Every structure is written in structure tokens, then in C-alpha cells.
Image (cartoon, helix red, strand yellow):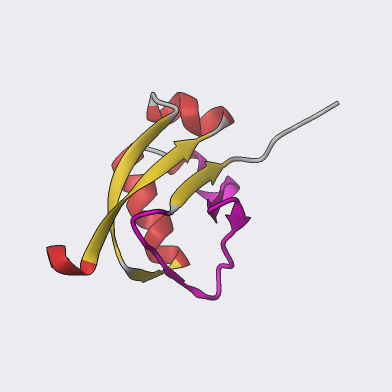
Amino acid sequence: MEIDLCVTVKILFFARSKDLAGTREGTITLPKKLSYQQLLNIVIEKYNLGSIRNNILLAKNEEVCEETRDIEISETDNIAVIPPLSGG
């Protein structure tokens, strides 16, 4: 990854992802454009979320990312890690 092609954004964790990451929020440096799968892999590796890999959604600026589309990232974006929530 070349630095000039990357941006640092805020990443937010909810529910089980917050417990595993050990924080509610942090920062992460990402390429300006990447696939959903690349984003997922980076987040899982950096924050030790492998145990919930198949059960999380990623959202950019409160909008769930589509797994089939590339994601364009800018410095003002927030990325959220959302595990499934159960209610009753």
C-alpha cells in the first residue's frame, strides 16, 4: 500500500466486535478504493475479529456496504463493524 493512496478513518465497533477489539472506536489506514472483501480482511486481521468473521456487516457512514461493490474511502468517513444483534 502506498501512503499517498491511503487515508486514515475512524472505525467504530458494536456489541461482540467491541468486546473482541477491546475498544469502542479506533483509527485504521485504508486504501482510497478497495473491495468489500479486502476491507473485511483488513479489519478482521487488525482487530482480531476472526471468530465472528462470517457474522458481521461493515457499514460506511451508517450505510451497510454491498459485498459486490468496490468501496471508496475518504478521510471524513466512518467505518462501523456490526455483528448480528439479538432482541427479544
**How many discs mark residues in the rendered view?**
0
Q: Which corner quadrant of the image does residue 68 belong to?
A: bottom right
User: Looking at this view, is 84 or 13 the one in front?
Assistant: 13
Vertical order, 78 against 21 (above or below)? below
Give the left or right position of residue 13, taking residue 74 as reference: right
Q: Residue at x 33, y 56 (%)?
A: 75
Residue at image location 66% in from the left, 40% down from the top: 84
* Placement of 43 over or under 74, stated as above or below: above
Percent x, y of residue 9: 34, 49
Please give left or right for residue 3 compared with residue 19 in the image. Answer: left
Q: Which residues are magenta?
A: 52-76
The residue nearer to you, when weighing 12 against 19, is 12
Q: Quadrant of residue 37?
A: bottom left
Image quadrant of residue 6?
bottom left
Residue 12 lies in the magenta stretch: no
Q: Quadrant of the N terminus?
A: bottom left
The residue positioned farthest toward the front in the image shown: 76
Q: Is residue 1 left or right of residue 44?
A: left
* Residue 3 pos. (x, y %): 14, 63
Q: Quadrant of the image for the C terminus?
A: top right
In the picture shown, does residue 2 fall above or below 54?
Answer: below
Farthest residue toward the bottom? 69
Q: Residue at x 51, y 43 (%)?
A: 81
Image spot of residue 77 (x, y percent): 43, 54
Residue at image point 59% right, 46% down: 55
Decide which of 9, 57 is in the foreground and name it.
9
Residue 69 x, y percent position in the rendering: 52, 75
